[in-house]
């Protein structure tokens, strides 16, 4: 299988806290890759470093064969990595449709001149953006709310909208930060179907999740972080039986105090 | 325009087309009505139009992009002084109006970028403080750059500025039609400014419902998420500052030419606050709000000045409160009432950031299938 993303010895320190130390992992094209670990293990920090929100202290990411720029989110998105957030971050005053349209920003070109003159290129691009955004809303199943201001959407729909917005950037790797947090069993089931569909359509998915059932049922491979270190990386069935992982989750083992 | 039409009570919802025509008619006959009350009222309307342009420009920065700017009047000053330098006996340069307009806009845009760079990482209160400082710096420069080399003529300001001259048509002279009919210069200025405002509305509206407007709104609603979908927030902020400043610069040029005189005292902090108040009062983030806010707050103090003095004289026999004092009092009162009763402004319409018809066309296509 082809490697899509390789993280090499990523390190990140906040003051006295080593949030990530020497984390290396490899994500293959087309898989759903889970990133799990107890609270505060450094999962979200890893996402933030990967997507350019933070600059790593050490290490590098190789994406599609070349190094990713660090600390420049828009360049990372342009290379084909999109993310969602643990606590939903939508553009609250924009409608669902406009949120997804905003997501197309990086793949469209219209500048001030084109906008002011409304030349043919700009009008055509705008029309395509609208249509693609609508298709994406349909894809995640919330097209009937296209004209609803996003802050008025229900929680589950907001999660879906955030995924649609991330997909609008036309990513090769979609990084989902706890997409099932706060969802009930039905919604989680629907989410699972959606993620499988996304994978089926050729987008590699990286997933931070606490819902063990979801992770085990969905992921091809799983990495476990604990205190900023990777303690295991394998198929879910093997990771489940790993002693270090059990110790990390249940306490005891080498981290007992 | 649609938002403005929809805001007209009763008619706006029932017959938007009629409402739109009504606005157009009002805009066209307003100076004629004002003339009945005296020529100074037409002059006030002219200024109201300039304030509308300013409010629209500031709304772009504050309402769309979410960058609180308390020094906006500085760009107005840059535009006005550019015009004064290039079309007055001060340096004895008299460039044509059409040549100065882009220069004024360009200098103001550059000033906008100059302000933008140092404040890229600031938000909210901190941004407000720095922009406030910037506005004061510009004003103090204008005030003191008369020594050792006299550039701005200091507190005396620059006068005898050339009037607006449209290809040989001098707007400051009354237009003579036939033998005994003439149109006062104030009317000419009014309709010229009205055109400028209409043009600004079209431009700002186009920006709003575009890729650029959505990027600004995204940045305003959640900067981190905006970055995460690939919006280059640095560039978008600089763009907002410079485009907002362009409108300030343009109306500054018009102001200089119309007034014939500029001095630093026209560009004080109070003016920045007044323009911001117009935007907030009307309804932040939508064009109609900025327009209505500017119109109401530009007219209100003048009406007050006209009413307050005679009223006090009849009631108390003498003037107790100076209209200027009363103006600030009532303005604050209006703002407080506004925040309590209509916190989203006079016209709290949610601004659209996409073309309506694109989606409805799409839906029609689907229904046809």
Image (tube, rainbow, N blue to C red):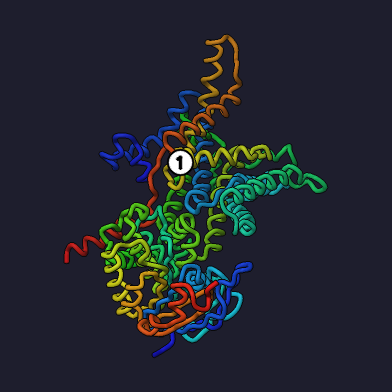
Q: Residue furthest right?
A: B148
Depth check, front residue: B211 or B345: B345
Pinpoint residue B191: horizontal percent, then vertical percent.
47, 39
Q: Residue furthest bottom?
A: A1
Res. A131 image quadrant: bottom left
Secondary element type, mark 1: helix
User: Relative to residue B75, is residue B235 depicted above or below?
Assistant: below
Q: Residue at x 39, y 71 (%)?
A: A209
Query: Quadrant of the image for the C terminus of chain B?
Result: bottom left
Dot 1, crowdedness within 10 Å: few (<14), some or many (≥20)? many
Near-viewer residue (A17 or A13): A17
Please tell me in which quadrant of the rendered image residue B320 appears: top right
Q: Is residue A194 left or right of residue B247?
A: left
Q: Is residue B266 above or below residue B133?
A: above
Residue found at the far top of this picture:
B317
Total tally of numbered discs in the picture = 1
- Name the spot of residue B67 as percent of width and height, x first: 54, 52
Question: At x 30% / y 64%, what residue is drawn?
Answer: A137
Left or right: A150, with B248 as reference point: left
Given residues B218 and B304, the one toward you in this image is B218
- When the figure is inspected, residue A101 is found, relative to residue A55, above or below; the finding is above
**Res A121 visible:** no
Question: Disc 1 sits on a residue from what chain?
Answer: B
Q: Is residue B283 left or right of residue B137?
A: left
Tell me where residue B1 sits by quadrant.
top left
Residue A21 vs residue A213: left or right? right
Image coordinates of residue A139 in percent, x first then y, are 28, 69
Which residue is depicted at the point 56% across and 82% down? Answer: A9
> Residue B265, how many percent across, how many down?
67, 37
Q: Please name the residue that numbered disc 1 is placed on.
A: B291
């Amino acid at each position: 299988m082809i490697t899509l993303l390789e993280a090499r010895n990523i390190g990140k320190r906040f003051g006295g806290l080593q949030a990530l130390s020497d984390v290396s992992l490899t994500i293959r094209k087309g898989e759903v890759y889970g990133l799990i670990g107890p609270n505060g293990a450094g999962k979200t920090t890893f996402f933030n470093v990967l997507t350019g929100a933070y600059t790593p202290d050490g290490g590098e990411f190789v994406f599609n064969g070349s190094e990713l720029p660090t600390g420049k989110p828009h360049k990372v998105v342009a290379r084909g990595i999109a993310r969602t957030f643990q606590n939903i971050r939508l553009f609250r005053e924009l409608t669902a449709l406009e949120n997804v349209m905003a997501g197309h920003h990086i793949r469209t070109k219209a500048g001030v001149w084109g906008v002011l003159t409304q030349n043919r290129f700009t009008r055509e691009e705008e029309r395509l953006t609208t249509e693609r955004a609508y298709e994406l809303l349909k894809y995640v199943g919330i097209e009937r709310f296209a004209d609803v201001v996003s802050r008025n959407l229900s929680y589950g729909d907001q999660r879906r909208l955030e995924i649609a917005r991330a997909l609008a950037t036309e990513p090769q790797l979609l990084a989902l930060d706890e997409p099932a947090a706060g969802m009930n069993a039905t919604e989680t089931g629907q989410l699972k179907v959606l993620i499988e569909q996304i994978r089926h359509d050729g987008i590699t998915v990286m997933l931070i999740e606490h819902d063990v059932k979801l992770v085990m049922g969905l992921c091809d491979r799983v990495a476990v972080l604990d205190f900023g270190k990777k303690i295991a990386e394998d198929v879910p069935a093997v990771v489940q039986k790993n002693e270090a992982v059990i110790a990390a989750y249940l306490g005891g083992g080498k981290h007992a105090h | 325009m649609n938002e403005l039409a929809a805001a007209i009570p009763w008619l706006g919802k029932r017959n938007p087309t009629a409402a739109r025509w009504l606005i157009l008619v009002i805009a066209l006959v307003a100076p004629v009505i004002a003339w009945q009350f005296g020529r100074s009222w037409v002059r006030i309307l002219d200024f109201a139009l300039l304030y509308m342009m300013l409010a629209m420009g500031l709304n772009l920065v504050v309402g769309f992009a979410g960058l609180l700017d308390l020094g906006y009047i500085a760009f107005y000053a840059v535009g006005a002084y550019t015009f004064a330098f290039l079309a007055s006996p001060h340096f004895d340069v008299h460039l044509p109006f059409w040549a100065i307009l882009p220069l004024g806009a360009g200098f103001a845009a550059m000033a906008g970028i100059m302000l933008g760079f140092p404040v890229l990482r600031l938000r909210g209160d901190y941004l407000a403080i720095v922009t406030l400082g910037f506005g004061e710096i510009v004003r103090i420069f204008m005030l003191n750059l008369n020594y050792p080399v006299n550039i701005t003529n200091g507190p005396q300001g620059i006068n005898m500025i050339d009037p607006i001259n449209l290809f040989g048509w001098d707007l400051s002279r009354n237009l003579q039609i036939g033998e005994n009919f003439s149109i006062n210069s104030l009317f000419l200025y009014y309709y010229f400014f009205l055109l400028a405002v209409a043009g600004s509305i079209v431009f700002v509206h186009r920006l709003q419902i575009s890729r650029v407007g959505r990027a600004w709104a995204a940045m305003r609603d959640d900067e981190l998420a905006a970055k995460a979908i690939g919006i280059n927030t640095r560039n978008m902020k600089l763009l907002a500052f410079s485009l907002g400043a362009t409108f300030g610069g343009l109306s500054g040029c018009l102001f200089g030419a119309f007034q014939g005189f500029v001095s630093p005292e026209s560009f004080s902090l109070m003016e920045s606050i007044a323009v911001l108040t117009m935007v907030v009062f009307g309804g932040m983030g939508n064009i109609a709000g900025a327009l209505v806010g500017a119109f109401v707050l530009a007219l209100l103090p003048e009406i007050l000045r006209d009413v307050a003095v005679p009223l006090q004289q009849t009631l108390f026999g003498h003037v107790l409160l100076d209209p200027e004092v009363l103006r600030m009092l009532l303005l604050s009162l209006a703002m407080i009432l506004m925040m309590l009763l209509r916190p989203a402004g006079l016209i709290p319409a949610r601004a659209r950031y996409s073309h309506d018809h694109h989606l409805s066309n799409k839906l029609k296509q689907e229904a046809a299938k």
